[in-house]
Amino acid sequence: MATSTSLARTSARGTLAVLRTESLASAALQEIERMILEGELQPGEKLTEMPLSDRLGVSRGPIREAFRMLEEAGLVRQEKNRGVFVRDIPIDEAVEIYDLRAAMDELVGRRLAEQISEPQAKTLGKLVEQMERAARLRDGDAFYRLNLQFHDLLVEYAGNRKLASMYRMLVKELALARRHNLASSQVLPHSAAEHRNILDAILSRDAEAAARAMFEHAMRSKDRMLQAHLSGAGLARQRRKG
């Protein structure tokens, strides 16, 4: 009996240890992901276990597990004998993601025009107002966060869980390539106006208009990304010549 009780206690301690490690890894994952998506950790930046362990107050085990999950999510890459790095999404891959996202946005817009509720419409309306305010203040960081929240709610309200899961994975990858699109204060008013148009189309209950507004917004965002990329490439060439 004593042996059986001892084994049970050992098993229970082992289970609790596993659960605690998983919980800590999940917490570490959320914080590191936030740092990546909000630009605290830049594309191409190396991630090291010890500084992150100290900063987040966890051991290195949960950090390593968080790295593994981030790699599965497409946000980091692990290179043998070199370490873990925030992914830098190539321009051709970003274009592919935008094209796929545009098709998904089209479906989301159509569904929302058919089924959006009054409380959902009010929530989206408040977000658009906050985006317009951030654009007037030229607050790119606030606008970026509100933009992510707006689109995440759109896909959530569409009510297709599989689509939402795939969409959120794509958006997280795209964040590595697109955050600089909104860095220019000149872009913010145009983007805010596009979000207002999306909301108006959805509230009009015109499924085709809503689908078109969301598709065109994604295509314009892709164009802005390509223009930013070309401008950055041009500046880089000028610096090398200088």
Image (cartoon, grey):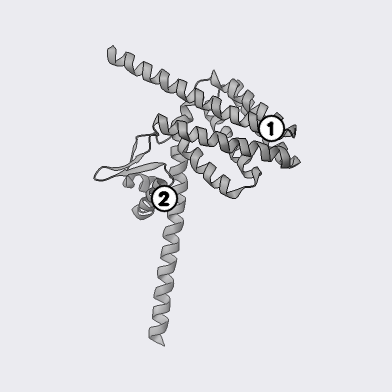
Q: Amino acid at mark 2?
A: Met
Residue placed farthest to the left in the image?
81
Q: Is residue 148 something one can see in this rendering?
A: no
- Going 44% across and 46% down the picture, which residue do you hit? 73
- Going 42% across and 43% down the picture, which residue do you hit? 74
Q: Amino acid at mark 1?
A: Glu
Q: Is residue 89 above or below residue 54?
A: above
- Tag 2, which secondary structure? helix
113 relative position to 187: left or right? right
Residue 72 is labelled as: none
Q: Quadrant of the N terminus?
A: bottom left
**Residue located beneath label 2 in the image:** 69
8 relative position to 141: left or right? left
User: Which percent across, then down, holds residue 174?
Assistant: 47, 35
Q: Nearer the viewer, mark 1 or mark 2?
A: 1
Residue 208 is labelled as: 1
Q: Nearer the viewer, residue 101 or 168?
A: 101
Q: Is residue 205 above or below residue 25?
A: above
151 relative position to 41: left or right? right
Q: Residues within 10 Å of mark 1 (few under 14, many from 20)?
A: some
Q: CA distance from mark 1 to mark 2?
A: 38 Å
- Tag 1, which secondary structure? helix
User: Which percent across, then down, holds residue 64?
Assistant: 35, 51
- Going 53% across and 27% down the picture, which residue do you hit? 221
User: Which percent across, then down, holds residue 85?
Assistant: 34, 40
User: Which percent across, then down, holds residue 169?
Assistant: 49, 43
